[in-house]
Image (tube, rainbow, N blue to C red):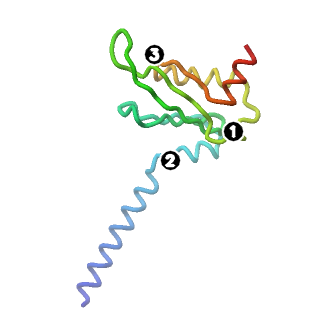
């Protein structure tokens, strides 16, 4: 009976340690912390076209959907659609901020054409 209790406690200890590691090393914790601290961070899995880009800029979380196509050299990401997760957080951002975000994405994907979803698209077209 004591042996069974010890084995169960050992299993609970191992599961607790595993849970702690997965909780503290989860990538979305970095994103949430960057939003809270209003830092700039870009998370992307370049090896997986199907995973979206997550980008935090001045505390606003943006998501970018990647599309693969052909260039003169090879298959690459040729188009990225970007939108904010929450539109109400865009207050205070200006055209220059979106140009900075565009340059950050172009640094990672130089052949990509970046398109914005509403309401950012209207802001960029009205200010030209």
CB under 8 Å between callouts 1 and 2?
no
Of the numbered discs 1 and 2, the one sitting upstream in the chain is: 2
For the point 33% across and 15% down, which residue is it?
Answer: 74
* Residue depicted at x 26% and y 78%: 7
Which labelled disc corresponds to residue 28? 2
Residue 46: percent from left, percent from top: 39, 30
The alpha-carbon separation of the residues under discs 1 and 2 comes to: 20 Å
In the image, residue 23 lies at what x, y percent? 45, 57
Mark 1 Cα-neighbour bin, 10 Å: few <14, some 14–19, many ≥20: some
Which of the marked residues, 3 or 1, is nearer the chain's N terminus?
1
Which residue is denoted by mark 1 in the rendering?
87
Looking at this view, is 51 or 32 the one in front? 51
54 up-or-down from 3: above or below? above
Q: Are marks 3 and 1 in contact (CB under 8 Å)?
A: no
Instruction: Work out whether 128 lies above or below 102.
Output: above
Where disc 3 sits, the SS reads loop
Q: Residue 9 vs residue 32: left or right?
A: left
Q: Nearer the viewer, residue 45 or 39?
A: 45
Q: Position of residue 107 (x, y in %)?
A: 49, 20
Pick out the residue farthest to the bottom.
1
Determine which quarter of the picture holds residue 128: top right
- Residue pointed to by mark 3: 111
Q: Nearer the viewer, mark 3 or mark 2?
A: 3
Compared to 106, does 44 lie above or below?
Answer: below
Give the SS element for disc 1: helix
Distance between mark 3 and mark 1 Cα atoms: 27 Å
Disc 3 to disc 2, how far (Cα)?
A: 27 Å
Q: Is residue 41 left or right of residue 37?
A: left
Q: Earlier in the sequence, mark 3 or mark 2?
A: 2
Q: Which mark is residue 38?
A: none
The 10 Å Cα crowd at callout 3, few under 14, some 14 to 19, many 20 or more, is some
């Amino acid at each position: 009976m004591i042996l069974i209790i010890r084995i169960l406690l050992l299993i609970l200890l191992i599961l607790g340690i595993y849970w702690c590691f997965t909780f503290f090393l989860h990538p979305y914790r970095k994103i949430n912390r960057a939003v809270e601290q209003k830092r700039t961070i870009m998370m992307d899995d370049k090896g997986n076209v199907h995973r979206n880009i997550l980008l935090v800029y001045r505390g606003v979380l943006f998501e970018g959907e990647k599309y693969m196509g052909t260039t003169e050299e090879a298959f690459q990401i040729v188009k990225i659609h970007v939108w904010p997760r929450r539109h109400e957080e865009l207050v205070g951002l200006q055209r220059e901020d979106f140009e900075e975000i565009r340059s950050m994405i172009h640094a990672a994907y130089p052949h990509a054409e970046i398109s914005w979803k509403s309401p950012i698209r209207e802001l960029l077209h009205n200010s030209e």
